Image (spheres, helix red, strand yellow):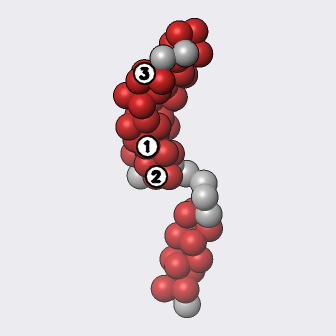
Amino acid sequence: MMGLFQELVAIQREIYLAFADRIGDFAKTGNWSLLVAYLPMGILFGAVHALTPGHSKAVFATYGNDRERA
């Protein structure tokens, strides 16, 4: 299971770096069409980020496992 999380974190890092470069392009040119073209990347980044560890998922998973054992 940890391998999956590590893979998701690596994907998140790649998307973040690519998105940061594209936002830099927008900042340099001020071309709004670039920003609109890059918005799907931001959505993808958010989706991958939501799957990574944190956001209380670990707490809920642990709580659920403890209740099943009781």
Along the polypeptide, which appears first: circle 2 or circle 1? 1
From the viewer's perspective, is residue 44 above or below residue 28?
below
Residue 58 lies, in percent from the top left, at 57, 62
Instruction: Estimate the spatial distance between the alpha carbons at disc 3 and disc 1, rounded to whole Å.
Output: 15 Å
Q: In this rendering, does residue 70 appear at all? A: yes
Circle 2 SS class: helix
Residue 34: which numbered mark, if any? 3
Which residue type does callout 2 highlight?
Leu
Residue 51: which numbered mark, if any? 2
Q: Nearer the viewer, mark 3 or mark 1?
A: 3
Apparent side of residue 40 relative to residue 31 in the rendered image (left or right): left
Q: Are marks 2 and 1 in contact (CB under 8 Å)?
A: no
The foreground one among 33 and 54 is 33
Q: In this rendering, does residue 21 appear at all? A: no
Residue under label 1, please give it. Answer: 43
Instruction: Estimate the spatial distance between the alpha carbons at disc 2 and disc 1, rounded to whole Å.
Output: 13 Å
**Is the residue marked by circle 3 packed among few (<14), some (14-19), or many (20+) residues within 10 Å?**
some
**Is the residue marked by circle 2 packed among few (<14), some (14-19), or many (20+) residues within 10 Å?**
some
The foreground one among 22 and 55 is 22
